[in-house]
Image (cartoon, rainbow, N blue to C red):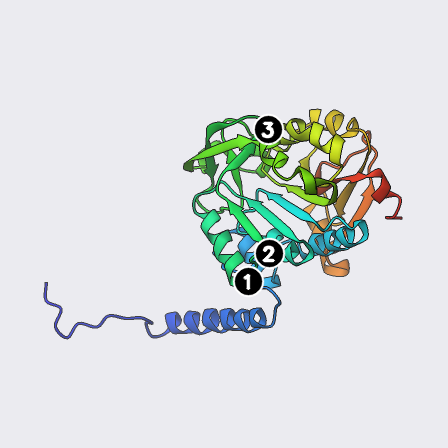
Amino acid sequence: MKIEGKKYFEIKPGFDLVRYLVDYSYVTTLARRAKRRPFRMFVELTSTVDRHVLTEGLFEKGVLDLLADLIRVSGHTRLMIDIGANIGNHTVALAPLFDRVEAVEPHPVLFHVMTANILRNNLSHVTGHNFGLAGEAATATLSETLEDHSICRVKERSRLSPEVFGLSADQFGEEFSIELRAADEFLSQYADDLSRAFIKIDVEGMEQEIIAAIAPLLEKHHPIVGFEWFTKAQPELTDIVKNIPGYELWGIRMHDMGKNYAMRAAKLFFTGRSYKLERLDPEKLDPIYPLAVLVPEAVGARLG
């Protein structure tokens, strides 16, 4: 093959040049905005979480602002345990509030992205752990969609079917072998700090298993616990969380929910997207909570 004198295009003339100018200008605008933000994050454009981080600085920023106020009011600032940390969105955003942070992420790639984000933000008091938590120690298969690493589920143990995410099993085509460790044993290492701790659990359908495993520790120490909750897919979780002594059940609600996409779009346009922390009635639950929150009774009295 003759290559002498052959042209190799970076940008082709015509429409490709227009496409390049539009794309590069937009990304440059986002980059300038990112430089002014308090946190700097490594992101991948194919992921939903990462795109939110790129455009808005953080994913679920309203949830994070709400949690920051809850943590300040509660005084639970000794320890944060982020179970299912992904790229470190919640870890990085909330870490400045705590004396110590333990971030747990089993994904073999995202763990390193999370570590990079921790280092990038000079969070020396944050420690990352490259394994998952479960009811007992085991090996398992972590599966994700090829298009979006923000949705990862433990294939053998998740209570959420692919259809819950609007996907099919075939779309979870990327798989990794991961280590799971016993959740109660892991948390027991930090028993001295649990009474002033915040624990976040976002593990795509294993919330029930983990909360059931650590329930004795919760009953003894009463940390604040936030967990993602698809209520219809995990109905047994209702009985577990409402029967742990010393807690009130609260939830973070997103106001533009519902199946009618046109109505949701209208709400978003006219009122934006906002979140509220509300006491929950276990008999009248929304289908999804970005985070439900187990709040110690002593803290609950200060939230009104």
Q: Which mark is residue 92?
A: 2
Q: Is tag 1's residue or tag 3's residue first in the polypeptide sequence?
A: 1
In the image, residue 71 above or below residue 11: above
Q: Mark 1 belongs to which amino acid?
A: Asn
In the image, residue 257 above or below residue 185: below
Q: Secondary structure at mark 1?
A: loop
Q: Which residue is mark 1?
A: 122
Q: Mark 3 belongs to which amino acid?
A: Arg
Residue drawn 61% across and 45% down? 82
Who is closer to the viewer here, 94 or 235? 94
Q: Which residue is mark 3?
A: 159
Residue 7 figure quarter: bottom left
Camera-side mark, 3 or 2? 2
Which image quarter is the N terminus in? bottom left
Question: Callout 3: 10 Å neighbours few (<14), some, many (20+)?
Answer: some
Q: Is tag 2's residue or tag 1's residue first in the polypeptide sequence?
A: 2
Residue drawn 70% across and 45% down? 198
Q: Secondary structure at mark 3?
A: loop
